[in-house]
Image (cartoon, rainbow, N blue to C red):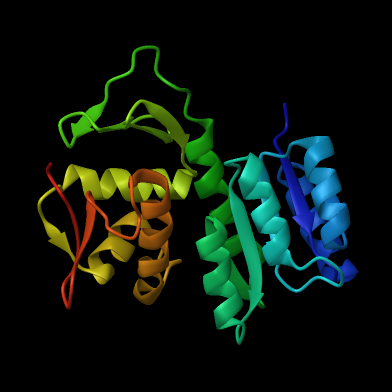
Amino acid sequence: MAETILVVEDEAELAELIRRFLERRGFQVVLAFNGTEGWQKFQEHQPDLVILDLMLPDIDGLEVCRQIRAVSTVPILILTARAAVEERVEGLKLGADDYIVKPFSMEELLARIDAHLRRVRLPPPGKRIYWRFGEGALLIDPQYPRVILHGEERLLTETEHRLLCYLAERAGQTLSPEEIARNVWPDGSVDPQNVKWYIWRLRQRIEPDPDQPRFLLTERGHGYRFALG
């Protein structure tokens, strides 16, 4: 069955260009031209991935991102103007997995889509093997995007899970933002300066108190360290 991609973009010409390109690659594409329609079609079609413009005529893309992330871990790829740095950062904080700057090539867009869907396609294993931290307070599932914190299951996005596993595999090591960006996003899609927002978002998921992190620590001037216990 073809995977479904929801494109929320108010520029009709660009939206149609994306639709034709992706349909030729075998995807089913649903278009929405404003935020209200995008949210409605998300609920109706339950897409496998969302391409979301930030600058929409009614409800802005940030609010749509917030609404989607409140109910789903589906990959969200945001479209942004080169100058919209604050909006781009806010999108990352709200749970977007990736961003692409206009103007962009369709081949670059396809590469980003394939990268995110490839991770989603991985089937969950039959037997769970967890990494344990903090005497079992935090359990990390290395093969499925979730953690268990004090017995409570918390779902992660694919990007959050990829980042968490990279840090947890190197627990005790201090890793620079440049090193994290280079290895977690090998396609170079994330500026090292934006790694801090992914770290902030991950803390909201895995820390008992995100303002006083126990597991994901900042080493000022050097980077980040995942605590062993």
Q: Please state the horizontal and vertical placement of residue 200, each as a whole percent of the image.
A: 39, 61
Quadrant assignment for the N terminus = top right
Question: Is residue 115 placed above or below 185 in the rendered structure?
Answer: above
Q: Is residue 53 left or right of residue 175?
A: right
Question: Is residue 2 placed above or below 34 in the rendered structure?
Answer: above
Question: Is residue 173 placed above or below 178 in the rendered structure?
Answer: above
Of residues 131 and 18, the one nearer the viewer is: 131
Q: Residue at x 35, y 55 (%)?
A: 210
Q: Please state the horizontal and vertical placement of residue 57, each as a whole percent of the image.
A: 86, 72
Q: Residue furthest bottom?
A: 83
Q: Residue at x 82, y 53 (%)?
A: 38
Quadrant assignment for the C terminus = top left
Of residues 85 and 67, the one nearer the viewer is: 67
Q: Residue at x 52, y 47 (%)?
A: 116
Q: Is residue 81 left or right of residue 126?
A: right
Q: Residue furthest top?
A: 126
